[in-house]
């Protein structure tokens, strides 16, 4: 499915497999995620940085038709993510680190935001940056992508931009 096709339809009109294949075509290292959990159905940590082929993704969604979509961050997808676990953490973080670029692709999660950036080699995954409800996901980390369903019952959705 091409960019025009995916943007012409709403998230609800696409299957998870359609979205997974779309992300894969963008160069994203996708993972089939267990619904309601931030855990993939597969063991992926020992894989190389080679993204799964489309046939493998199709097989995953045949095996787990309710799977959500995850993204391996860092070197795997060439994307790092700031994971704000609450909206209140955003202004607190910006006081310490400066404003979030207004054009950064952003996903609304069940409780907060994911802000996407180009991967920066040499950084590591961190939880609770400066004691805030902010995590940093890079190589070895995973985030969930739209239109996956958060455990709160809300869908992850693109708020600004699209990777």
Image (tube, rainbow, N blue to C red):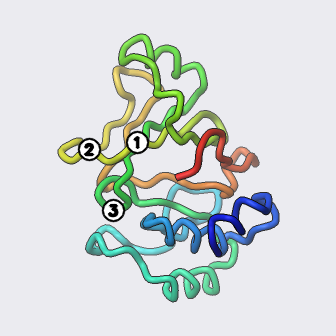
Q: Residue furthest front?
A: 4
Q: Which residue is mark 1?
A: 117
**Badge 1 element:** strand
Q: Position of residue 48 (x, y in %)?
A: 26, 74
Residue 133, above or below 60: above
Q: Of label 3 and label 2, which has the lower sequence position?
A: 3
* Closer to us: 58 or 151: 58
> Which label lies toward us, 1 or 3?
1
Q: Which numbered marker is on residue 120?
A: 2
**Quadrant location, the N terminus:** bottom right
**Are the residues flagged by discs 3 and 2 in contact, CB closer than 8 Å?**
no
User: Quick check: marks 1 and 3 in contact, CB under 8 Å?
Assistant: no
Neighbor class of circle 2 (other Cα within 10 Å; few <14, some 14-19, many 20+) is some
- The answer to whether the residue labelled 1 contacts the one labelled 2, judged by CB atoms less than 8 Å apart, is yes
Q: Label 3 crowding class (10 Å Cα cut-off): few <14, some 14-19, many 20+?
A: many
Q: Percent x, y for residue 121?
A: 21, 47
**What residue is shown at x 63% (from left), y 65% (from top)?**
3
Task: Look at the numbered disc 3 and give the secondary structure of its residue.
Answer: loop
> Which residue has dot 3 on it?
76
Q: What is the CA distance from the residue labelled 1 to the residue labelled 2?
A: 8 Å
The correct choice, above or below, for 104 with respect to 92 in the image is below
Most extreme residue toward the left is: 122
Q: Is residue 45 left or right of residue 59?
A: left
In this rendered view, identify the residue nearer to me: 35 or 155.
155
Is residue 110 placed above or below 45 in the rendered structure? above
User: Residue 20: horizontal and vertical position, in percent?
Assistant: 58, 70
């Amino acid at each position: 499915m091409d960019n025009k096709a995916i943007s012409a339809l709403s998230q609800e009109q696409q299957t998870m497999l359609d979205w997974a294949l779309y992300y894969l075509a963008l160069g994203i290292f996708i993972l089939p995620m267990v619904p309601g959990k931030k855990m993939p159905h597969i063991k992926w940590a020992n894989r190389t940085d080679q993204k799964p082929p489309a046939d493998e993704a199709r097989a995953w969604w045949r095996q787990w038709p309710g799977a959500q979509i995850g993204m391996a961050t860092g070197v795997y997808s060439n994307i790092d993510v700031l994971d704000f676990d609450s909206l209140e953490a955003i202004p607190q973080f910006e006081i310490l680190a400066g404003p979030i670029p207004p054009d950064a692709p952003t996903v609304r999660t069940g409780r907060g935001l994911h802000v996407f950036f180009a991967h920066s080699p040499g950084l590591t995954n961190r939880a609770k940056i400066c004691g805030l409800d902010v995590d940093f996901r890079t190589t070895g980390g995973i985030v969930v992508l739209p239109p996956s369903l958060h455990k709160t019952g809300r869908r992850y959705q693109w708020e600004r931009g699209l990777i």
